Image: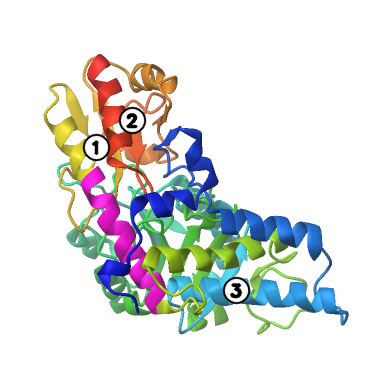
């Protein structure tokens, strides 16, 4: 493994992302990130050189089959799935809908699902729809003082009838990291499974489903420097109690295919797999060596270290601005990622973002599909919050540019 001195500087990392040369400050990364050239090149090469169907005996087909298999292996490495499986799908919303439709077949009327109010609608709507068949939804309230769903709040809701607890690991609006292992421990004590939405966590820290003991964990690869896909991890025992949605002649234990009707996006798999090359660069690892779990962890440790000062700077600036309400934790510590939302007591979020739109800085406003959360926090839902979101490739100068524009209007 490389020493700290071997970690690449920010300019080297940015040079790996062709889009960053455009001059636009991409501060809307919670919506979607940019991709390194290795990812784009791998997808181009797949489409122009090996675009055939999987599973046949000729060499090109064998290569494609291997690419898709290796992409699944990469997804398992990425989430640290020593146990269980990684299912690839088109988006987190689609995968959670698929999961809920599987649970619809095994849950009985009267069983309960606990939903965190901090959730994105992708991990709420699919479960709420099960109410029609007699499943009871219990809302896990957000504490507006701390912007968290507390463990005490969860304890009060868990019971013998609880089948599932669905929560975001990080809210895409608030930016605080939930205590997932503690949630899992409480839920498991009550015999319930946990469905964690890791979309807003995955770009910022290494995922470790094995350490967290979580049953289901999902994230969107297009927010983590990859193609537009998503990964759903399921623990073996959680998967085995569900009927998969694939054709009835596909064996039930043919995993993850049983949960991938129609298969995964093949060129997307090529892109996802190539992300390993970039993670090696980010980790300061040898380009010729394989992408290992240690590389993934080191890459994200480096990413978190690069991101933290950006988060601290914007939070400090906003904290000093009269009329600004930061929606989320205000300290840039370990338990927070660089997704920062705020409202203003006089200006609408729309007005603020409109003033930024033509400055070459990309941010946005809205409820970000955290619709119920906005309602519960008293944020006008249609106007929503102003959100700026950093990842490791952003620069201090980009944050200063944003602050410069904010200064003209706030
Ligand atoms: C926290 C969170 N969960 C889920 C989603 C939905 O992801 P997808 O677009 O892959 O369906 C998003 C998208 O922004 C999100 O931020």
Foreground disc of the pair 3, 1 = 3
| Apparent side of residue 239 relative to residue 6 in the rendered image (left or right) | right
The residue nearer to you, when weighing 258 against 83, is 83
Q: Which residues are magenta?
A: 294-310
The residue nearer to you, when weighing 311 against 37, is 37
Residue bearing the label numbered 1 = 327
Total of numbered circles in the picture? Answer: 3
Compared to residue 294, the image places residue 194 above or below, namely above
Residue bearing the label numbered 3 = 72
Task: Indicate the secondary structure of the residue bearing disc 1.
Answer: loop
For the residues marked 3 and 1, what is the alpha-carbon distance in whole angstroms? 36 Å
Residue 356, given in percent of the width and then of the height, sits at 38, 21
Queried whether the magenta region covers residue 217, the answer comes back as no
The residue nearer to you, when weighing 103 against 170, is 170
Compared to residue 276, the image places residue 314 above or below, namely above
Q: Residues at badges 2 and 1 in contact (C-beta under 8 Å)?
A: yes
Residue 396, given in percent of the width and then of the height, sits at 27, 40
Queried whether the magenta region covers residue 306, the answer comes back as yes
Residue 219, given in percent of the width and then of the height, sits at 48, 59
For the residues marked 3 and 2, what is the alpha-carbon distance in whole angstroms? 36 Å
């Amino acid at each position: 493994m490389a020493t700290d001195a071997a970690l690449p500087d920010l300019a080297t990392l940015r040079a790996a992302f062709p889009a960053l040369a455009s001059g636009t400050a991409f501060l809307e990364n919670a919506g979607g990130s940019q991709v390194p050239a290795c990812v784009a090149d791998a997808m181009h090469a797949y489409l122009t050189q090996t675009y055939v169907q999987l599973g046949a005996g000729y060499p090109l087909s064998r290569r494609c089959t291997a690419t898709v298999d290796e992409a699944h292996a990469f997804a398992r490495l990425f989430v640290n799935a020593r146990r269980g499986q990684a299912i690839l799908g088109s988006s987190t919303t689609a995968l959670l809908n698929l999961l809920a439709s599987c649970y619809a077949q095994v849950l009985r009327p009267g069983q309960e699902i606990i939903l965190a109010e901090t959730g994105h609608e992708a991990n709420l709507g699919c479960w709420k729809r099960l109410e029609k068949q007699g499943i009871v939804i219990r809302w896990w309230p957000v504490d507006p003082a701390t912007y968290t769903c507390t463990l005490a709040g969860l304890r009060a809701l868990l019971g013998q009838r609880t089948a599932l607890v669905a929560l975001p690991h990080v809210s895409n609006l608030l930016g605080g990291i939930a205590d997932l292992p503690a949630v899992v421990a409480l839920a498991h004590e009550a015999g319930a499974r946990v469905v964690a939405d890791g979309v807003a966590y995955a770009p910022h820290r290494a995922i470790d489903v094995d350490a967290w003991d979580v049953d289901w964990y999902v994230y969107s690869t297009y927010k983590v420097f990859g193609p537009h896909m998503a990964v759903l991890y399921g623990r073996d025992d959680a998967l085995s109690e569900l009927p998969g949605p694939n054709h009835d002649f596909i064996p039930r234990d043919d995993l993850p295919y049983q949960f991938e009707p129609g298969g995964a996006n093949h060129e997307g798999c090529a892109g996802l797999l190539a992300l390993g090359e970039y993670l090696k660069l980010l980790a300061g690892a040898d380009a010729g060596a394989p992408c290992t779990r240690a590389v993934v962890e080191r890459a994200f440790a480096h990413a978190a270290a690069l991101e933290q000062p950006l988060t601290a700077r914007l939070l400090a600036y906003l904290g000093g601005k009269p009329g600004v309400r930061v929606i989320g934790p205000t300290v840039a510590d370990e338990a927070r990622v660089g997704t920062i939302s705020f409202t203003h007591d006089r200006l609408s979020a729309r007005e603020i973002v409109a003033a930024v739109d033509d400055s070459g800085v990309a941010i946005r406003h809205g409820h970000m599909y955290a619709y119920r959360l906005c309602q519960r926090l008293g944020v006008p839902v249609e106007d929503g919050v102003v959100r700026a979101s950093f990842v490791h490739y952003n620069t201090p100068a980009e944050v200063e540019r944003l602050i410069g524009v904010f200064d003209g209007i706030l």
